Image: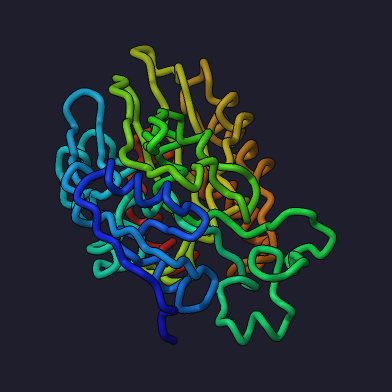
Amino acid sequence: MRLPAFEYRAPRDVAEAAALLAAAPDETMLVAGGTDVLPNMKRRQQAPRVLVGLRGIDELRTLDVNGVVRIGAGVTLTALVHHEGLRARLPGLWQAAAQVATPHLRNMGTIGGNLCLDTRCTYYDQGYEWRKAIDFCLKKDGRTCWVATSSPTCLAVSSADTSPMLQALGARVRLVSVAGERLIDVADLYRNDGLHYTTRRADEILTSIEVPAEAGWRSTYWKLRRRGAFDFPVLSVAAAVRVGADGTVQAARVVLGAVASRPLSAPKAEAALINRTMTDAAIADAADGAYEVAKPMDNTDFDLVWRKRMARALAGYALRELRGDDMRETRLKLTHHL
């Protein structure tokens, strides 16, 4: 498969990139590592007239873990994985970044690109001729969502690894355009719509991520996929808890990935932990809450009923790890499939 014709621009700073994007936002796309955009272009899922390359912008590659953690959107996933300070401060984010794809793709892929990752679907992630044979789909060139033919919205699934974890960590992202900038919660960056899956405007650039310096939080990320490497998640659980001196949970966030078109919070799972110690009973109640909110569709790998059941299992594993249980053997078994 060959790329379609396009113009490539390489701005020197964010202001120049924003001006290029503003000139023709409907015909222009941003590219950093290119691990998502370029394959999509080869499959004619996206065909921008102009690509604005962000890789040469130094201000997008900053990383500071002192106090508020600030991560430039152009920081590669490999840089995150190799940063010991980040691993110590935000182990869940480190786990999420470490489980994205393969080392080669992490060398190129950026955290900003992962946050803006296109939604995926069995009927969408195919070559042009395959999609043409089914009269395309609602996400691109068609009128029908083949996952659920009566659905008025696209049901393509959110498959990013870092977004559920950053949402669980209460992170915010900075969006910049020629009109100014805005800082929003990661939770507000997404819509539950596979076609219009982010609230980022076409003229905006995601420039950085900020994670608040909240003491006492523990975090972890668990991922289900067919192979132990490379594959996108078919289910993920990002969990973070703050435990008081008496051992009770003061605050909790549980977020599921790959079960909807956006990362999904599990409020009943979170409520089941508050003001309780992390006993087996409390964890079981929280895992039930995660199971309840998980509503995977038949649009990716594995049977959807099994994927839903695994939401309970992965939530339990994540919370046991946050309690302090040694879950290394379970992680290894999950890598090779339970």
Using the image as rendered, state which of residue 296 and residue 19 is in the foreground: 19
Please determine whether, in this image, residue 223 is positioned above or below residue 245: below
Q: Quadrant of residue 152 in the image?
A: bottom right
Q: Position of residue 86 (x, y in %)?
A: 21, 39
Toward the viewer: 46 or 39? 46
Q: Residue furthest top?
A: 246
Quarter where residue 84 is shown: top left
Residue 42 coordinates in the image, percent (x, y): 45, 78
**Residue at the extreme right:** 150
Residue at the front extreme of this rendering? 23
Q: Nearer the viewer, residue 14 or 19?
A: 19
| Residue in view at x 65 percent, y 63 percent | 139
Q: Is residue 309 visible?
A: no
Asked if residue 29 is positioned above or below residue 74 in the image, the reply reads below
Q: What's the residue at 65%, 61% (across, down)?
A: 306
| Residue 197 position within the rendered picture, expressed as x and y whole percent measured from the top left | 58, 49
Q: Position of 189 compared to 105: left or right?
A: right
Q: Is residue 226 above or below residue 210?
A: below
Left or right: 96, with 12 as reference point = right
Left or right: where 86 falls relative to 162: left
Q: Residue at x 31, y 38 (%)?
A: 208
Q: Horizontal and vertical percent for residue 29?
A: 42, 58
Placement of the N terminus among the 4 image quadrants: bottom left
**Quadrant assignment, res 147:** bottom right
